[in-house]
Each structure stands twice: as C-alpha cells, then as structure tokens.
C-alpha cells in the first residue's frame, strides 16, 4: 500500500507485529521513535533488519519508520525484516524475485505450541514411576 511516496507494510513473526512506513530519504531507520542502534543492542539483530535493504542495494535510499510490539527482540527483528521486504516489494515489483529467492517474503508461521492438560508443557510429561 502506498500514499504519496510513503510505502506501508506489515511484518509478523511469532507474536511480534511490525508496521513499516518507508519513504525516500537518506537511509535512517527509526524503531518506536528510537534509533535502530539504540533499540537493538546486538549487532546480529541490526544485520537481520538491514538484510532486505542490502540485498536489493537500497540501504541509503529510504528513511524507514517502524512501530513494533509484542514478543522479544529477536522476533521483533524478524518481523521488521519481513515488513521491510514487503514494503520494498510494494514500492518496486521488480525486486520480488530476489526477495523471494532469499526467503524474505515468506511469513514464518511457527509459533509456540500450547500447553496440554495432563502434561508439564506442550509435550513434556511429568516423570513416570511404575511404583
């Protein structure tokens, strides 16, 4: 979806939801009104967020504003990556094959399995004793 040079997309991972607003600019990425380096302390999470931009060689072409909530930092980073990939695709459909080949457009559907009654967790059982 786009309105007057601003491209919007939603990315999801586990329970994290990222709303990504992308517009032409200098390459500034702000997450929840904070700089990305301030929001994500780990370098690997910052690399995950930048992956679609570096793959399509658009690192310094767009300013990106992101609202993300839910889940932990790792899930949020992957949700942001998914949202940025979808926004790039919405802006330029020629980028789709490269993003698809790298697996950046596919929503990772894995979620935490629910705990079942009679068990200690989703699959873990209480210790069994014959006597």
Image: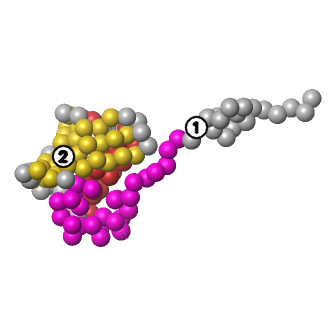
Question: Disc count in the image?
Answer: 2
Q: In this view, does 31 lie above or below 55?
A: above
Residue named by callout 2: 21
Image coordinates of residue 112 in percent, x first then y, are 53, 41
Locate residue 56 relative to residue 113 in the image: left or right: left
Locate residue 114 relative to residue 56 in the image: left or right: right
Instruction: Please tell me the numbered disc located at residue 83.
Output: none
- Look at the image and tell me whether residue 43 can be seen: no
Q: Earlier in the sequence, mark 2 or mark 1?
A: 2
In the image, 84 versus 3, the foreground residue is 3
Image coordinates of residue 71 in percent, x first then y, are 40, 36
Residue named by callout 1: 114
Q: Which colour scheme is used?
A: secondary structure
Q: What SS does tag 1 mark?
A: loop
Image coordinates of residue 9 in percent, x first then y, are 24, 50
Which of the 4 quarters of the picture holds residue 125?
A: top right
Q: What stretch is highlighted in magenta?
A: 86-112
Locate residue 31 relative to residue 111 in the image: left or right: left
**Which residue occupies 37% across, 34% down?**
70
**Which residue occupies 19% across, 33% down?**
33
C-alpha separation, residue under disc 2 versus residue under disc 1: 33 Å
Image coordinates of residue 18 in percent, x first then y, are 30, 42
State yes or no: residue 109 in magenta.
yes
Farthest residue to the top: give it.
Answer: 131
**Which residue occupies 23% across, 46% down?**
20
Q: Pointer 1: residues within 10 angstroms few (<14), some, or many (20+)?
A: few
Q: What SS does tag 2 mark?
A: strand
In the image, 6 versus 27, the foreground residue is 6
Q: Quadrant of the C terminus?
A: top right
In the image, 114 versus 72, the foreground residue is 114
Farthest residue to the right: give it.
Answer: 131
Locate residue 51 relative to residue 110 in the image: left or right: left
């Amino acid at each position: 979806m786009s309105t007057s040079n601003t491209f919007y997309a939603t990315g999801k991972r586990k329970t994290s939801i990222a709303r990504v607003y992308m517009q032409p600019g200098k390459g500034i990425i702000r997450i929840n009104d904070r700089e990305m380096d301030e929001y994500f302390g780990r370098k690997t999470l910052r690399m995950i967020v930048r992956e679609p931009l570096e793959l399509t060689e658009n690192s310094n072409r767009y300013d990106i504003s992101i609202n993300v909530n839910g889940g932990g930092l790792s899930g949020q980073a992957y949700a942001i990556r998914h949202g940025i990939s979808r926004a790039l695709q919405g802006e330029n459909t020629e980028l789709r094959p490269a993003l698809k080949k790298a697996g950046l457009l596919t929503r990772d559907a894995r979620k935490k399995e629910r705990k079942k009654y009679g068990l200690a967790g989703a699959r873990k059982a209480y210790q069994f004793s014959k006597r």
